[in-house]
């Protein structure tokens, strides 16, 4: 079928009959116009035939949105959630899970080959998630007194006495909150707790936060659970209303016996980041205990912990396998976070040295090591490129194995230089961004051979994919 270019006003261009053939970065569908240009389309999936409203045009590609579906892909499935297409949280809920895995694996492979410039390596098939839904152990919701209205509601011109919402931010609209009726990412009673909070707050005329005027009472709600089914509830309040908050908290505790700890923080700041707030414990110990293959971790309201518990455990096991430890190795764990991977490896290593920039994370890592009786772990705090220096290397034993799990931006060039000087026998590189991972591997390839990779699906129904890479010194 031919592609037609139709000019509809100045700068308003429609590309007709574009077949989506694959998925690109961030889950956009990829097609090709008759003139050879790549067409990147939001709102479509591979296999769709669409007319495209062009938003941006470059020399080699255009970006656009679906104007009209001519033919639907045979790989489409019916989305489970009533909020699909508005929420933005599960953008691939309309795509067959097997195809999700295929496109995620292809993205990793393409990045390693194209950005990394490497083609000779073993690709282990992507590790699919044990559960396609209800896999998150932490969810965060926002209160708003100005919920997002559907187009139908706006056209209808109805006046709404109650615009309160408790849910997610609409993508690209920081002040608008989608009032969630259901969510399929966290197990029960996540939905029930959220809906009960909303119902109680409405019934008792509690003020929902106004993000524009920065006023109100109820601001955010975080729900967290462990593998034992114990729950943590954390409220952020814009201001303190002791009587109202006590009654709300007591209501929740009476309704949901699964809540083992309930906390709150008063936050009058312009942002809702929790990390610089003082957390008050209303009920329970103020933390949850999580266990992974015999290791215990104390999870507080500010703790970073993998949100997909079951798949995180698989990722740690595979990282352990890639490290090939015999019990005699010194292991460096860069960007160690709360030391989860470090401690998972410590039982099979002679010594583990972890480095992390966040002081609270290092405090947690040390606490966890003590909790688990691990005396062969040492943790150091500071910016990686400032701590992981020649002076550091001179005062610590050389590494046999180095594990690195950096943020999405990847590793700083100075860190890569120090890794080359350290010269560990093996590097296990865990990444949530295979593009920056491939860039870093390219900088290492004169000294290290990429042996194998293993993509890991941590977040089904989304385009996100993790990857584990094993590099061996040449």
Image: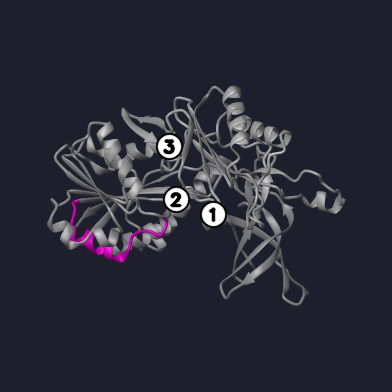
Q: CA distance from mark 2 to mark 3?
A: 29 Å
Q: Residue at x 70, y 33 (%)?
A: 199
Query: Do labels 1 and 2 touch, CB within 8 Å?
Result: yes
Q: Nearer the viewer, mark 2 or mark 3?
A: 2
For residue 269, which numbered disc appears in the image? 1
Residue corresponding to mark 2: 276
Task: First in sequence, mark 1 or 2: give its number.
Answer: 1
Callout 3 secondary element: helix
The answer to whether residue 209 is above or below residue 446 is above
Image quarter in which the N terminus is found:
bottom right
Q: Quick one: 53 or 193, which is closer to the camera?
A: 193
**Can you see residue 339?**
no
Q: CA distance from mark 1 to mark 2?
A: 10 Å
Image quarter in which the C terminus is found:
bottom left
Callout 2 secondary element: loop
Q: How many marks?
A: 3
Is 424 covered by the magenta stretch?
yes
Residue corresponding to mark 3: 311
Magenta region: which residues?
Answer: 408-425
Q: Residue at x 68, y 46 (%)?
A: 178
Query: Do labels 3 and 1 touch, CB within 8 Å?
Result: no
Task: First in sequence, mark 3 or 1: give its number.
Answer: 1
Callout 1 secondary element: loop
What is the x, y in percent for residue 436? 40, 60
Q: Quick one: 340 or 10, which is closer to the camera?
A: 340
What is the x, y in percent for residue 53? 71, 65
Q: Which image quadrant for residue 74?
A: top right
Left or right, residue 171 beside residue 386:
right
The answer to whether residue 229 is above or below residue 106 is above
Q: Residue at x 28, y 32 (%)?
A: 371
What is the x, y in percent for residue 157? 87, 52
Task: First in sequence, mark 2 or 3: give its number.
Answer: 2
């Amino acid at each position: 079928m031919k592609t037609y270019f139709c000019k509809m006003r100045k700068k308003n261009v429609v590309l007709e009959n574009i077949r989506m053939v694959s998925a690109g970065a961030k889950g956009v569908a990829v097609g090709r116009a008759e003139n050879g240009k790549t067409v990147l389309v939001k709102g479509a999936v591979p296999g769709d035939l669409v007319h495209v409203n062009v938003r941006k045009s470059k020399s080699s590609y255009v970006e656009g949105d679906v104007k009209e579906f001519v033919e639907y892909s045979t790989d489409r499935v019916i989305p489970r959630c009533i909020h699909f297409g508005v929420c933005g949280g599960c953008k691939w809920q309309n795509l067959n899970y097997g195809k999700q895995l295929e496109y995620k694996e292809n993205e990793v492979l393409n990045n390693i080959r194209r950005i990394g410039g490497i083609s000779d390596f073993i690709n282990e098939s992507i590790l699919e998630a044990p559960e396609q839904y209800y896999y998150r152990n932490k969810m965060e919701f926002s209160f708003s007194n100005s919920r997002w209205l559907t187009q139908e509601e706006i056209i209808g011109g109805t006046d709404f006495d109650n615009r309160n919402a408790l849910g997610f931010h609409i993508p690209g609209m920081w002040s608008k909150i989608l009032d969630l009726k259901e969510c399929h990412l966290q197990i029960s009673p996540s939905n029930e707790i959220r809906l009960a909070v909303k119902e109680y707050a409405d019934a008792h005329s509690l003020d929902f936060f106004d993000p524009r005027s920065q006023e109100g009472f109820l601001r955010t709600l975080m729900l967290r659970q462990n593998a034992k089914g114990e729950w943590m509830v954390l409220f952020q309040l814009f201001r303190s209303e002791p009587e109202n908050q006590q009654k709300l908290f007591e209501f929740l505790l009476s309704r949901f016996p699964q809540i083992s700890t309930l906390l709150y923080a008063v936050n009058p700041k312009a942002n809702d980041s929790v990390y610089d707030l003082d957390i008050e414990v209303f009920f329970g110990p103020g933390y949850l205990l999580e266990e992974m293959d015999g290791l215990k971790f104390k999870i507080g309201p500010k703790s970073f912990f993998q949100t997909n518990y079951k798949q995180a455990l698989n990722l740690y096991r595979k990282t352990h396998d890639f490290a090939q430890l015999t019990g005699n190795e010194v292991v460096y764990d860069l960007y160690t976070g709360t030391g989860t991977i470090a401690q998972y490896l410590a039982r099979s290593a002679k010594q583990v040295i972890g480095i992390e920039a966040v002081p609270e994370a290092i405090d947690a890592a040390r606490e966890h090591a003590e909790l688990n009786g691990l005396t062969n772990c040492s943790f150091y705090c500071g910016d990686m490129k400032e701590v992981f220096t020649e002076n550091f290397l001179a005062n610590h034993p050389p590494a046999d194995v180095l594990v690195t799990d950096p943020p999405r931006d990847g590793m700083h060039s100075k860190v890569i230089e120090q890794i080359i000087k350290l010269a560990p026998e093996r590097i296990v590189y865990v990444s949530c961004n295979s593009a920056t991972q491939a860039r870093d591997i390219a900088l290492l390839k004169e000294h290290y051979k990429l042996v194998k990779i293993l993509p890991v699906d941590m977040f089904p129904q989304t385009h996100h994919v993790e990857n584990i890479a094993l590099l061996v010194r040449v």
